[in-house]
Image (spheres, rainbow, N blue to C red):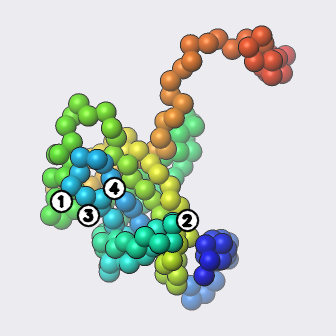
Amino acid sequence: MTQQAIAAAYRKKLASNPEGVDEPLKTWEIYHPLLSKRYLLVDDVVDLVAYLEDGVTQVTFKAANITTKSAANNADMNQSATMTAADVDNTLDDELDRIPLDNTTLPTLIYREYLPTDLSFPAFGPIEYEAQDINQGKGTFTAEVSAPKLNSRGTGLVLTPDICPLIRGFMT
């Protein structure tokens, strides 16, 4: 199928939940420049071989027990989500020890969903998040993620009608 056909089938699944159609497969990609590799995980009992959004790059997502609390818009206008994965061997815990505490680059987590019937493109995503809080425990890895904060720095300018004429509508 084409990327548009996969997206249409995904919308149909969400809208009508047709009988006999399996749930989309939820995947996470964990990346940081200091990690030894990218971690590709799928919430399933078997590994998933699928193509990324370019339709050319084939990757293998490793089976993992993952719980995803989908993205939500909070009162602070940040889109955030939570991902918890079983990390029985503490592999992710050990990998995160490679990142020094004074490092300012946040780990990136990318969320995708695939339809089990066609793995040539993601049906939803990629959604790129930055890890805001990571909790590690014996056997679990939890990341609270949110959309990158691109506009977090102020300009230092005070908005006045001279600088921004459209603000007059809010002032009246």
Helix, strand or loop at disc 3? strand
Residue found at the far front of this picture: 56
Q: Which residue is mark 2?
A: 124
Q: Earlier in the sequence, mark 3 or mark 2?
A: 3
Q: Earlier in the sequence, mark 2 or mark 4?
A: 4
Q: Looking at the picture, which amino acid does disc 3 mark?
A: Ala
Classify mark 4: residues with Cα within 10 Å, few (<14), some (14-19) or many (20+). some
Q: Which residue is mark 1?
A: 91
- The numbered dot on residue 86 is 3
The reply to whether residue 138 is visible in this rendering is yes
- Separation (CA) of disc 2 from disc 4: 17 Å
Position of 172 with respect to 120 (left or right) is right
Residue 92 percent across, percent down from the top left = 22, 56
Q: Looking at the picture, which amino acid does disc 4 mark?
A: Ile
- Separation (CA) of disc 4 from disc 3: 14 Å
Position of 128 with respect to 157 (left or right) is left
Q: Quadrant of the N terminus?
A: bottom right
Residue 29 percent across, percent down from the top left = 37, 60
Position of 23 with respect to 137 (left or right) is right
Answer whether labels 4 and 3 touch (C-beta < 8 Å).
no
Q: Nearer the viewer, mark 3 or mark 1?
A: 1
Examine the image and state in which quarter residue 86 appears. Answer: bottom left
Q: Is residue 72 above or below residue 65?
A: above
Helix, strand or loop at disc 1? helix
Answer whether labels 1 and 2 touch (C-beta < 8 Å).
no
- Residue at (53, 39) in percent of width and height: 78
Is residue 9 or residue 22 the one in the foreground?
9
Q: Looking at the picture, which amino acid does disc 2 mark?
A: Phe
Q: Earlier in the sequence, mark 3 or mark 1?
A: 3
Q: Which residue is mark 4?
A: 30
- The numbered dot on residue 50 is none
